Amino acid sequence: MGLAQTPTEVARQAVQDWQAGKYQIDPSQALGKTPEEAIRVLERSIAFASPPPNLSVNLAEPQTQQTPSGTLVRFPATVGAQGGEVRVTLRGGEVTRIAFAPQGGLLPGWVKSPVAWALFIALSLGWLLALRGNTGLALWWREGWALIQQYRRTYIGLNIALYGLYILGSVVAYAEPRLVKLLQEMVGGALEQVGIGGAASAGPLGLALVIFYWNLTRGLLLTTAVPGLALGIPALLINGLRYFIFGFALSPVAIPMAAFVAHIPTLIIELQAYILGTFGGLVLLNKVLQGEGYRAGLRALALLVYLGMFFLLIGAWYEAFEVLYLVR
């Protein structure tokens, strides 16, 4: 009778099989199956996503550690010039997940610098102080809120619609709690690839900066303000879907109630930032239709994105505090 393999040996063989395509599964196989079978197919396709092209793994230098998810075995790896590691998770001696994690994730190196953290503190305090005076920042702030007052019906309606979609997603999630957990695993895997998860080790300053940077660039600018330039409608559609998915993924059905309650301020503050950006696109559309011209609408969009940036700043500080001190 042969000896039982160690976690390292099991992980090493799993990586070789993974690169050979043994674990690969097409998510489209979920089509036509029962909900239970479809969820199992999707779970496996996420847990064993295809290895990136040109992946080279050093199987001779594994590192093993125990985690709440099971035994984690890490192997140094590269994809072209990008360094990183292949992570294999085992539970009860069985491989449950394999993935490549790039070194540093998708975040630029400067966000992890203490100099950047100091500048972020200065930005936060300076912005708060500037709003109390007669500076340009304060003037833009008042102009932005004046637009909200001018188009308050559109603004109120947009808040009702988008927050309503979030609530709808949260309610619908109760029908498929396993699908909610699956979506949370997808989000967690994506954040791991980005490198946001590791930012928590940098403390509140580093984590707040990373949260602000990611939400600003990927959330407010690239997927709200830029689509808003096309007369607002694309931004509305993108964020309508975003809010429903957020509601579904962050439903209390799959989150401890204490953690959910602690996260409510983050949701209200950060989602309001995207509402302001979406509203800016609709104001742009309104000004074009009223004959004021695209340039006037573009200025309105910029002012409302500016307000959204401030909401993201406040939200980032609270979320960092929440993650590090409230839900651990």
Image (tube, rainbow, N blue to C red):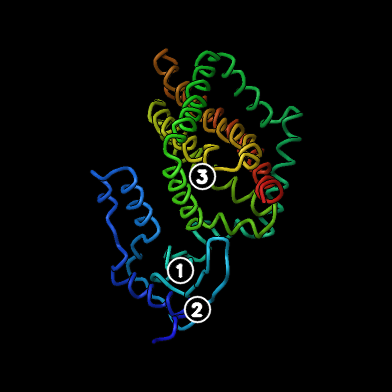
Residues tagged 2 and 3 counted as in contact (Cβ below 8 A): no
Q: Earlier in the sequence, mark 1 or mark 3?
A: 1
For this orientation, the residue located farthest to the left is 32
Q: Which residue is mark 2?
A: 62
Q: Earlier in the sequence, mark 1 or mark 2?
A: 2
Determine the residue positioned at 56% across, 32% down: 273
* As drawn, 5 above or below 100: below
Image mark for residue 217: 3
Residue 305, position as x, y percentages in the image: 54, 32
Q: How many marks?
A: 3
Dot in front, 1 or 3: 1
Residue 49: which quarter of the image?
A: bottom left
Q: Earlier in the sequence, mark 2 or mark 3?
A: 2
Q: Amino acid at mark 2?
A: Pro
Nearest the eye: 196 or 169: 169
Q: Which residue is mark 1?
A: 88
Q: How far apart are labels 2 and 3 at the CA level?
A: 35 Å
Q: Secondary structure at mark 3?
A: helix
Q: Amino acid at mark 3?
A: Thr
Q: Residues within 10 Å of mark 2 (few under 14, many from 20)?
A: some
Q: Secondary structure at mark 2?
A: loop
Nearest the eye: 91 or 112: 91
* As drawn, 31 above or below 138: below
* As drawn, 100 above or below 236: below
